[in-house]
C-alpha cells in the first residue's frame, strides 16, 4: 500500500524528555492557563558540557523576548500546551552557535552524552557499545520490567535514512536539538539516530565489516556513536508474520526492536527529521508530557477525537466541559473489547471516579486527533491484518507519526506482530493497540496556524464534522488522504500536517527574526 509520490510520508525521527512540572487540574479538564512551573537548575546544566565552560544551550541562558503582539492566536490548539505563550525564544541566540567552525569539534557529542549520563546516573552496560547491543542475536523473551533506579529514562530517537542530506542548516538544527534535550539535562535523556538502509541485501546483523562500511558511508562522523542501522532484511527476520516492512507503512517496527534492545528506556519520543521547534526542545516536550500526565481518562478518547478551537471555547477547560456534557458517561472507559484479543491494560475503576488517570504518565502522546477511521474513506481504512474481527476491529488513527510511546506499548505491539501477525499501518498502530489494551493515550492540543483567512466557525465546520466519538473524523475529513485522492480543505497551509507549505514558511520567518511562541512545525524541507 502506498501514497502517490506527492503524499508520501518521510521517515520520522523521534525525540524525548522528562522534567519537573506542576499542574492544577479539575475533573477531566486541564487548564492551559492555570499554574505551570518547570524548574531548570543551573547545577544540572553546568554539569554537562561539550567543551569546558560551554553552557549556551541551557534554556535559562538563551535569549527570549515577549511574544505579545507578535502573532495572532492559533486557530487550533493552545500555545500553553507547549510552554509559556508570552515567551518567545529567538532563533539568533539559538542556532548560530551550532554552525560548523574550526574552533569546535562536533565529533564528540556521542561521548559527551555518555559523560553526561555518567554524572547523574549509574550507567548500565546497555549505555555503552551501542552497535554491539543493537546487533546482538537476542531472542525476544516477552515484556520485561524497565530498568529502574534513577527515575524514568527517556530515549530520543531520530528516524533517518541512508541518503538523507546532512546540509549545514540541518546539521546546525540537529546539534541544537541534541544539546537542548540531552547534553544539558544531566544525562537523563539520550539521543539516537535510527538509520534505515534502503539496500535489503546488506547483512547488517552478521557482517561486521559491511555494517561498519555502511555506518561510515551513511552517517556523519559526529553522529556515528549515536546511530544504529537497520534494513528491511532486519525487520523481516523479526516480524515474519507481517507482510509489510517498508518504512512508509511500518514506521514502528524498528522502534519496537530498539525498545526491546535498550530496555532501560521507559519512554521514547520519535521525531521526524523535518520537524522543527520554535522553542527549547526539552522544555517543549516536557510541557507536552506534563499536559498528558494531567489528563483524566474520563471522556479522554472523545477529547482526543476532535480539534480544540480556542476561538469557540476560549479555554481547554471549557472545551473539556463541552465534551463531558455531550458524552456524559457513555465514553470509552478502559479497554475496548474485540474478539480473540486479551487486553493487558488495567481494568477501570467505577465511572464515578472522574479523576482516574490524573497524574498517570501517558503510554502514548500524539499531536493530532486520534480518530475512528471507519467511514472516513481514508486510503488505509481497510488496512487491518490478523485481527479476528477484521474490519469490525475497533481502531484509532492519528496522522503524522511523531509520538511519545512507552516501552510497555511498543512491546505489546511487538508481541502482536511477532507472535500473531496482527498489524495496521503506521498511523493506526500505536493508537489502536492503546485503545484495545486500555492504555492512556493523549492528543496534546498544540497550536496550529493556518496561512489563510478563515474564521473559527468555518474551520470548525471543516475539521470537526464527524460523529461525537470522533468529531475530527467522519466522511472524507480534509486532513486525510482518501481513496479517491486529496480532499479539499485548509491543511495545505497549516503549520503542522504531513505535507504543505505552512510549516516551511513559518520556519523561514522564524530564522529571519520573527518572534514565534512555542510551536511544532512540520514538514520543514529546508536544505
Image: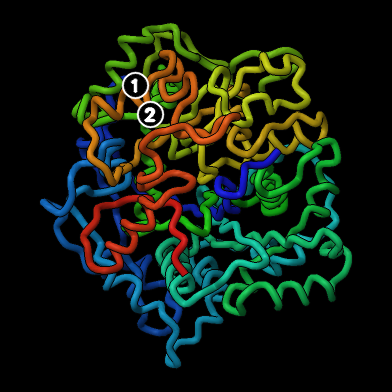
Image position, residue 378 (x, y; %): 57, 28
Query: Which residue is rendered at x = 29% and y = 52% of the image?
Result: 518
Q: Is residue 9 above or below residue 345?
A: below
Percent of width and height locating residue 379? 61, 31
Residue 213 is left or right of residue 303, and the answer is: right
Q: Quadrant of residue 312?
A: top left
Which residue is rendered at x = 50% and y = 33% of the image? Answer: 480
Image position of 319 (left or right of 314): right
Position of 417 relative to 263 (above/below) = above
Q: Nearer the viewer, residue 400 or 408?
A: 400
Whether label 2 touches label 1, CB < 8 Å: yes
* Residue placed under numbered mark 2 in the picture: 295
Q: Residue at x 16, y 62 (%)?
A: 65
Kind of element beneath mark 1? loop
Q: Is residue 516 left or right of residue 235?
A: left
Q: Toward the viewer: 403 or 451? A: 451
Instruction: In this rendered view, identify the residue nearer to me: 201 or 263.
Output: 201
Dividing the image into 4 quarters, which one contains the N terminus? top right
Q: Position of residue 349 (x, y in %)?
A: 49, 13
Please say if 372 is above or below 55.
above
Are there few (<14), some (14-19), or many (20+) residues within 10 Å of tag 1?
many
Q: Position of residue 292 (x, y in %)?
A: 40, 35
Residue 453's disc is none
**Left or right: 206 as drawn, with respect to 335:** right
- All told, the count of numbered labels is 2
Colour setup of the view = rainbow
- The numbered dot on residue 28 is 1
User: For residue 36, which quarter of the picture?
Assistant: top left
Q: Which residue is at a point 64% across and 13% down the rendered structure image? A: 337
Residue farthest to the right, as pictured: 206
Amino acid at each position: 500500500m502506498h501514497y502517490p509520490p506527492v503524499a508520501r510520508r518521510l521517515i520520522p525521527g523521534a525525540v524525548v524528555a522528562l522534567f519537573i512540572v506542576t499542574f492544577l487540574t479539575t475533573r477531566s479538564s486541564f487548564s492551559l492557563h492555570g499554574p505551570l512551573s518547570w524548574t531548570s537548575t543551573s547545577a544540572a546544566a553546568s554539569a554537562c558540557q561539550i567543551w569546558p565552560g560551554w553552557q549556551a544551550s541551557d534554556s535559562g541562558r538563551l535569549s527570549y523576548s515577549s511574544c505579545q503582539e507578535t502573532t495572532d492566536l492559533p486557530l487550533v490548539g493552545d500555545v500553553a500546551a507547549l510552554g509559556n505563550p508570552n515567551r518567545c525564544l529567538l532563533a539568533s541566540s539559538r542556532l548560530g552557535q551550532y554552525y560548523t567552525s574550526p574552533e569546535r569539534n562536533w565529533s564528540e557529542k556521542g561521548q559527551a552524552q555518555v559523560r553526561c549520563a555518567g554524572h547523574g546516573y549509574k550507567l548500565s552496560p546497555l549505555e555503552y557499545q551501542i552497535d554491539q547491543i543493537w546487533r546482538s542475536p537476542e531472542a525476544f523473551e516477552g515484556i520485561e520490567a524497565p530498568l529502574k533506579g534513577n527515575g524514568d529514562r527517556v530515549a530520543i530517537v531520530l528516524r533517518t535514512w541512508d541518503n538523507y542530506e546532512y546540509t549545514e542548516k540541518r546539521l546546525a538544527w540537529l546539534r541544537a536539538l541534541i544539546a537542548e534535550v540531552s547534553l544539558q539535562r544531566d544525562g537523563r535523556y539520550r539521543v539516537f539516530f535510527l538509520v534505515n538502509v534502503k539496500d535489503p541485501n546488506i547483512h547488517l546483523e552478521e557482517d561486521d565489516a559491511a555494517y561498519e562500511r555502511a555506518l561510515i558511508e551513511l552517517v556523519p562522523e559526529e553522529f556515528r556513536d549515536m546511530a544504529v542501522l537497520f534494513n528491511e532484511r532486519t525487520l523481516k527476520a523479526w516480524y515474519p508474520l507481517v507482510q509489510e516492512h517498508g518504512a512508509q507503512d511500518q514506521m514502528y517496527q524498528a522502534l519496537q526492536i530498539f525498545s526491546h534492545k535498550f530496555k532501560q528506556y521507559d519512554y521514547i519520543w520519535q521525531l521526524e527529521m523535518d520537524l522543527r521547534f520554535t522553542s527549547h526542545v526539552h522544555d517543549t516536550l516536557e510541557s507536552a508530557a506534563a499536559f498528558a500526565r494531567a489528563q483524566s481518562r474520563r471522556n479522554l478518547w472523545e477529547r482526543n477525537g476532535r480539534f480544540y478551537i480556542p476561538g469557540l471555547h476560549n479555554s481547554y477547560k471549557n472545551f473539556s466541559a463541552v465534551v463531558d456534557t455531550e458524552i456524559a458517561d457513555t465514553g470509552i472507559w478502559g479497554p475496548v473489547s474485540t474478539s480473540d484479543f486479551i487486553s493487558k491494560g488495567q481494568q477501570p475503576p467505577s465511572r464515578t471516579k472522574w479523576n482516574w488517570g490524573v497524574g498517570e504518565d501517558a503510554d502514548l502522546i500524539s499531536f493530532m486527533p486520534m480518530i475512528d477511521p471507519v467511514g472516513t474513506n481514508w486510503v488505509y481504512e481497510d488496512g487491518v491484518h490478523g485481527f479476528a474481527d477484521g474490519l469490525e476491529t475497533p481502531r484509532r488513527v492519528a496522522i503524522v507519526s511523531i509520538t511519545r510511546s512507552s516501552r510497555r506499548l511498543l512491546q505489546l505491539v511487538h508481541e502482536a506482530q511477532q507472535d500473531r501477525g496482527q498489524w495496521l499501518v503506521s498511523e493506526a498502530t500505536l493508537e489502536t493497540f492503546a485503545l484495545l489494551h486500555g492504555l492512556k493515550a493523549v492528543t496534546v492540543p498544540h497550536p496550529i496556524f493556518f496561512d489563510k483567512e478563515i474564521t473559527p466557525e468555518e474551520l470548525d465546520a471543516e475539521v470537526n464534522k464527524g460523529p461525537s466519538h470522533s468529531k475530527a473524523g467522519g466522511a472524507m475529513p480534509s486532513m486525510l488522504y482518501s481513496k479517491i485522492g486529496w480532499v479539499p480543505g485548509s491543511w495545505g497551509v497549516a503549520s503542522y500536517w504531513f505535507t504543505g507549505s505552512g510549516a516551511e514558511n513559518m520556519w523561514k520567518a522564524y530564522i529571519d527574526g520573527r518572534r514565534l511562541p512555542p510551536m511544532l512545525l512540520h514538514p520543514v524541507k529546508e536544505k
